Amino acid sequence: MKKILFIVGFCIFICTNLFADNIDIHLQNYYKLQQSAVSLTTYCSNSKVYVCSGIIIKEDNNSTGILTAKHCIVPKIKKIVINDKYVSFKFKRAKDIDVAYIELNHSLLRYNPVKISNYNANKLDYVYFLGYPNKEMFEIGIILWNGIKEQTTVMNSIPGCSGSGVVNQKGELIGILWGSYNIDFFNKKTHIAGITPIELIKPFLIKLKIWNKLRFE
């Protein structure tokens, strides 16, 4: 426990003291995410509604491909609203990770697919996401821990941010946000968010025959 608290404290120190030195990079990634991040609301046959986020990973004249969290795309889904518009869609849910892929049968104009990283972010790397819980929410964090099934970050996230694409400092997708929790650090709440890393998402996209259609650095 002491080790975890030390790591959290160190990450907070790094974030606080290096933020100003990287302000241009932070802004660049905000603008990049604005071109690929989307709001996503799903309506189910049992009248439940899920507010989430997503990120565009591929697009052509006839289709748009979006990644989000699997728990946002339930089997009894009836309608999807993306950026306040109803869309026609089909979807695939990954088996062992909290990731789903949505494909629309048309292009979303004015958007550019995010570039994809081949590798997970490293510990202490800056990462970013742009989500739409109710309104636009841009967050900057730092990789805290690399686990087998997830990466942990010091980064704020609230309900509705699930499914957001998380990018590295180069603006490349390194994972999909699935949720968050808080821990107490010296009587101050510290936000921790969990990411499904790109190296776990890659086999899912390969199976869907999508990986070789994506944008890379």
Image: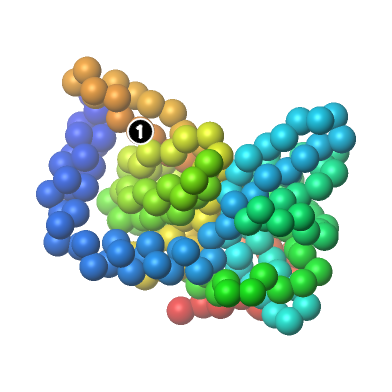
Q: Residues within 10 Å of mark 1 (few under 14, many from 20)?
A: some
Residue 85 pos. (x, y %)? 71, 56
Q: Is residue 16 visible?
A: yes
Residue 169 pos. (x, y %)? 34, 65
Residue at the disc numbered 1? 191
Query: From the viewer's perspective, is residue 112 above or below residue 92?
Result: below
Query: From the viewer's perspective, is residue 126 above or below residue 159?
Result: below
Residue 120 pos. (x, y %)? 45, 59
Query: Could you tell me which residue is drawn at 46 percent across and 54 percent down?
Result: 130
Q: Is residue 200 visible?
A: no
Query: Could you tell me which residue is drawn at 53 percent across and 41 percent down?
Result: 134
Query: From the viewer's perspective, is residue 93 above or below residue 181?
Result: below
Query: From the viewer's perspective, is residue 206 above or below residue 204?
Result: below
Residue 78 pos. (x, y %)? 85, 44
Query: Could you tell me which residue is drawn at 47 percent across and 64 percent down?
Result: 34
Q: Nearer the viewer, residue 147 or 70?
A: 70
- Rendering quarter of residue 30: bottom left
Quarter holding the N terminus?
Answer: top left
- Rendering quarter of residue 190: top left
Query: Could you tell me which residue is drawn at 54 percent across and 66 percent down?
Result: 36
- Rendering quarter of residue 97: top right
Task: Check disc 1 and give the amino acid type.
Answer: His
